[in-house]
Amino acid sequence: MLPIAMIIGLIFHEYIHYISFLSKYLIFIMLLITYCRVRINDFHVGAYIWWLLAVQILGAIVVYLVISPFSREVAQGAFICIFCPTATAAPVITGMLGGSVSKVATYSLFSHVTVACLAPALLSYMAPEGEIAFFDSVVSISCSVLPLILGPLVLALLMRRFSPKTHSAIATHQGLSFYIWAVALIIVVGNSVSFLLRQPADKLSEILMLGAISLVACLLLFLIGRHIGGLFGDKISGAQSLGQKNTVLAIWLALTFLDPIVSAAPAAYVAWHNTVNSYQIYRMEKSKRIGKEKTQKGI
């Protein structure tokens, strides 16, 4: 699905702008599907959640402050990759790898809500200076981000209470997220390619730097998440919670509220975290196949 979606976005990038407005609606639907899967009794806010949130939020801020004196755009790229919440498809991938789906789904909820609450102030602080007053920027970003992220949660809770059959139908069809995500990926890849092709040649080094910093961020997030997860008996869930990102949301935030060139970082992250996941799934399937062959030989 990843290569096909990326190729389609690449080939038809000149026409993607006609459907770009769908991005936020697709994000809304993907979040709604994920939230419908999370049950109230799954909400265990313990040290596991706090450690992951600390890396996601405080880590993003620290990295931005360290890099910004050298390059504001690269710092924003690193920030948005780390700050970005867990991917809506992460619970599905986690289940395929043998991790705890409920843990990742719960963390996905908390990471999205946290981003919704903090993004307006943080993005306003990082936005290009002089374009809009800080308070006005916070209000503007809040009006865009909060409904997009918190709206699906409210709707999922209302459906659970007043339309349980609809809620159950959505909760049991989590695979829909993959197909919706593929369409969203086509749009973000197409938009990113169109934007990058319009950049002057002197921006190439900066774009490459953004791609490189997103790779470093991706590998570190998977490793740190795996370590934190290991402390609580679930390395897979920890790695997926921190490493697999909602890049559709990250690219939308970068293009909408930051210097548009920053979107190159989360755009590259699309390839990095899916490459890691593909490798993990390949290793798991290979291990299963070898185990099955050994069992058959033993019989």
Image (cartoon, rainbow, N blue to C red):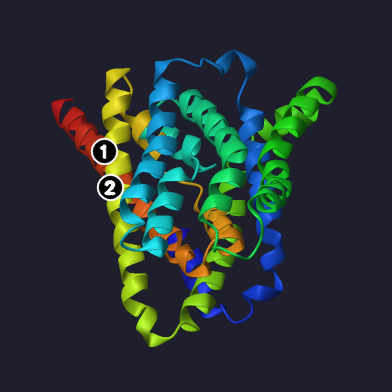
Looking at the image, which is closer to me, 157 or 134?
134
Q: As drawn, is 14 to the left or to the right of 28?
A: left
The furthest residue to the right: 162
> Which residue type carries mark 2?
Leu
Considering only vertical position in the picture, is 113 above or below 21?
above
The residue at the point 69 percent across, 42 percent down is: 146
The residue at the point 47 percent across, 67 percent down is: 6
Q: Give the label on residue 54, or none.
A: none
The answer to whether residue 182 is seen in the rendering is: no
Quadrant where the image shows the C terminus: top left
Q: CA distance from mark 2 to mark 1?
A: 6 Å
Q: Residue 110's x, y, as percent?
A: 55, 29
- Which residue lies under the disc numbered 2? 219
- Mark 1: few/some/many CA within 10 Å (<14, 14-19, 20+): some
Q: As drawn, is 247 to the left or to the right of 231?
A: right
Q: Residue 177's x, y, as percent?
A: 59, 45
Q: Are marks 2 and 1 in contact (CB under 8 Å)?
A: yes
Considering only vertical position in the picture, is 20 above or below 93?
below
Q: Residue 267's x, y, as percent?
A: 45, 62
